[in-house]
Amino acid sequence: MAAELRRPERTFTIRQLCLEFKCTPRALRFYEDKGLLSPARQGLNRIYSYKDRARLQLILRGKRVGLSLAEIREILQLYGKGDGGAAQNAKALRKFRERIVAFEQQRADIDEHLAELRQACARLEAFLEKSAPDLLVSAAEMAPPPPSGRSSTDRRLASPRHA
Amino acid sequence: MAAELRRPERTFTIRQLCLEFKCTPRALRFYEDKGLLSPARQGLNRIYSYKDRARLQLILRGKRVGLSLAEIREILQLYGKGDGGAAQNAKALRKFRERIVAFEQQRADIDEHLAELRQACARLEAFLEKSAPDLLVSAAEMAPPPPSGRSSTDRRLASPRHA
DNA sequence: CGCTCGGCTGACGTAAACGTCAACGCGCCC
DNA sequence: GGGCGCGTTGACGTTTACGTCAGCCGAGCG
């Protein structure tokens, strides 16, 4: 049995995937309602294959970069019929290029904002250095790795809370 | 022209700003309800100063990079009391650094996704070049979608929803 | 004087992405 | 056979960022 767990037909329960990817069962069922996932069933229970797991990874990465579930579904559908007609592939290519353009735009916006923030930081640092150096915490000493035990700072920085 | 816009006595009606920045009066009033703008009044009518215009620019850029209105308001408030107490400036500095870290993370996510998309594009291009070169539209020319099927022009490309 | 135009103020509607709650099924275990 | 734990299906609630609609006001105009 233990050997079977590593074979490609390895399956997952909803809870296993939720634990692995830090999400809730409700979310997975919601993705299913929206057509992003369609796991097999044993009776009523959902059985996720390794392919479902891969799709879930794509969904979450898409969300991290700001795609809507509808957009992610489109892309997944295009991935899905990858070896179908050439016309479908052409459509997928168009979609992907659109995404690239959009992402590049978004990246440029971020860069612009970053530049502005850095400039604002520099101004504030200069000001504080003269008026109240005791309040100035240099940027160098941001995020020292914890020597042991738990980290003092909650590690949710990867995703700017929206949900 | 830019000097014209910055002249302190220059004011704007709600419609002028909406036209300039491609948004609706409803949106501007909404931002006001949320405390992001507070234009002067002539009777009931809103009168926007060049400072209000600058704030609006910041709001829209913040939205483009995925900030919620609440987050944008925080930043605007910190900007606002720039010459207040040194403690306030220190707090602003902390906030700004947090933002920088978050943005860098978001940028990294985008870069990752971009790399993946480009790779997928390359695969599709190679495939199409062999199977159906007639369907291959080079990346240089971005043509409108074919007559078959509906157009999906209703999507605002640069704005992630999340928030 | 009537009428439209732009603006204003509520008040309600909407879409996305889930959270929360209720009620129930099923296997297991003592 | 009663309870626990995991799972399921609705159904309703929530937040964000507005859209839409109704109704009112003052300015201008023919």
Image: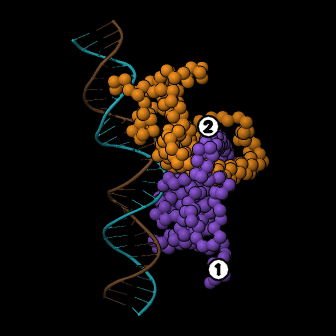
Chain colours: A purple, B orange, C cyan, D brown
Question: Is residue C24 rendered to the left or right of residue B96?
Answer: left
What's the distance in space between the residues labelled 2 and 1, CA to CA?
Answer: 47 Å
- Callout 1: helix, strand or loop? helix
Question: Is residue B92 rendered to the left or right of residue C23?
Answer: right
**Residue that appears at 51% across and 54% down:** A161
Q: Which residue is mark 2?
A: B145
* Residue B12 position within the rendered picture, expressed as x and y whole percent measured from the top left: 47, 23
User: Mark 1, chain letter?
Assistant: A
* Residue A76 position within the rendered picture, expressed as x and y whole percent measured from the top left: 60, 54
The residue lying toward the viewer, choosing from B89 and C7, is B89
**Residue that appears at 74% across and 49% down:** B122
The residue mark sitting in front, 2 or 1, is 1
The amino acid type of the residue labelled 1 equals Glu
* Residue B103 position within the rendered picture, expressed as x and y whole percent measured from the top left: 61, 49
Quadrant of the rendered image containing residue C24: bottom left
Question: Does residue A40 show up?
Answer: no
The amino acid type of the residue labelled 2 equals Pro
Question: Does residue A142 show up?
Answer: yes
The residue lying toward the viewer, choosing from A103 and B82, is B82
- Callout 2: helix, strand or loop? loop
Quick check: A37 above or below B47? below
**Residue that appears at 47% across and 46% down:** B70
Q: Which residue is mark 1?
A: A4
Please state, as top left, top right, bottom left or bottom right, where the N terminus of chain A lies in the image: bottom right
